[in-house]
Amino acid sequence: MQSRFSRLFSLAALKSGLFWRTFLLLGVLTTLSMSAWVYMISVVQREPQVQQISAQVISVVTITHAALTHSAPELRRELLFELVSNEGIRIFTLEDDDEVEPPPDNALMPEIEALVKAKLGPHTRFSSSVNGMPGFWVSFNIGEDSYWLMLERERLRGLTGIQWLGWAGVVSVLSLLGAAAISSLINRPLARLTSATRDVAEGRRPDPLPEKGPAEIAQANRSFNQMVEDLAQVESDRAVILAGISHDLRTPLARMGLEVEMANLSPEARDGIQSDIAQMDAIIGQFLDYAKPTEASSFVNVDIAALLQETANETARLPDVKITTHIDERAHVLGNGTDLKRVLNNLVENARRYGKTPGTDVTEIDMRCDVKGMGAFKRVMIEVQDHGAGVPDEQIAQLLKPFTRLDAARSQANGAGLGLAIVDRVLQRHGAELTVKNRDGGGLVFQITMKAL
């Protein structure tokens, strides 16, 4: 049997969930929208940004050229100092041996150069660094003399690629957070429905789902609540019907038993009839055990170790059974003690009937109980093993189905074929996991995993 716990915590199941699919689709849509938006903005603002930077460079060079040309020679030093201190503009003489770096390598620079040279002349030079001093450098001439004009890069800088990427990253993160919130909002009603469905599958009655929200969700929840009510009613009706059948059948059976005792019959005939009556009474009891509801609200702290030891002591008194035990006394679970005792008795009885050691009339049963894990992952592991012939692997799943017997050898036993079905049904109601497999060396292993207290 597949593990419910492994299915619940499986990473693959998590990644394939509706939340992650919705989040991924919204994330992809948001990313594509952001990319298109950034591209459109960069294209739309490209020409205005080129025009703005070019106009600023042309204006600064023209004004500086005019100021230096028309100022008195003795005032030029003061003018240059004022340009540096107030405008961040520096003027240097252009020398042939200047170490000149190429202009900034970006998509706007070629267009800026073209516009500036169209206004200032084709001899205008550009540089990103002169003599190791970084900046935005533009050359101009006054008469026969050539000069460098340096502007601070911050004055001409628009949004760089890194800045665009940063802003796009911020917006993308906010968009993804919004996508996660939307996905969670969409997924929450379905998650509640999934959890409630799991409760029904494990034999528990879930709390009613809220019948509000979008019309489709409200209608689905309303239908599910109605289904739960109908199932509960069917379960109740079945219990009432089976109880009535039990009463109606056991009364004539008791009368038949009394008449057999009073009848003038041979001992062989009397024993045979009484055996048949006892078998019919046992079958009725199995039907009632299978249909009996178990409410989780009635669960209490059960000393499963004590139940196992009690079952082992009772089994050890049988003449045809040899039982060995290894029981951890710390084993406690939340459940119904009577139902769990019935589970243990059914497993031991199944082993006693079908697990006889080949070549002998003795059944060897190994009973083991261990407590494993810690905290929320603490589990009680119970194993009941026999040393019989086992069953074919492909038929193991059939063992837990009601009214099922696998071969003629098993059909010799009395009963309706509900023993293991009762075990599986009770364990499902306790949220436990039952695993059935063949034992190495022969026989069957019944392994029960329950949450420990």
Image: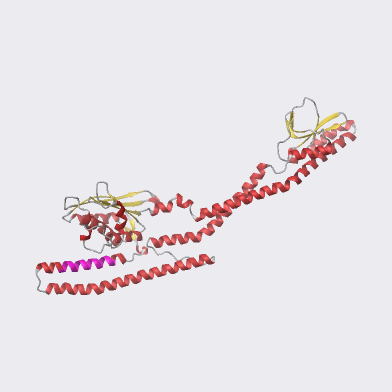
- Return the residue nearer the eye: 269 or 175: 269
- Return the residue nearer the eye: 392 or 415: 392
Q: Residue at x 54, y 65 (%)?
A: 214
Display colour scheme: secondary structure
x and y, in percent, of residue 159 in the image: 70, 44
Q: Where is 29 relative to 121, above or below?
A: below
Q: Work out whether residue 210 can be spotted.
A: no
- Return the residue nearer the eye: 113 or 391: 391
Q: Residue at x 70, y 49 (%)?
A: 41
**Does the magenta run of residues contain 352?**
no
Read off the magenta span: 273-288
Q: Where is 389 relative to 405, above or below?
A: above
x and y, in percent, of residue 397 in the image: 32, 56
Q: Quadrant of residue 52?
A: top right
Q: Is residue 351 left or right of residue 222?
A: left
Q: Residue at x 56, y 56 (%)?
A: 181
Q: Is residue 268 left or right of residue 182?
A: left
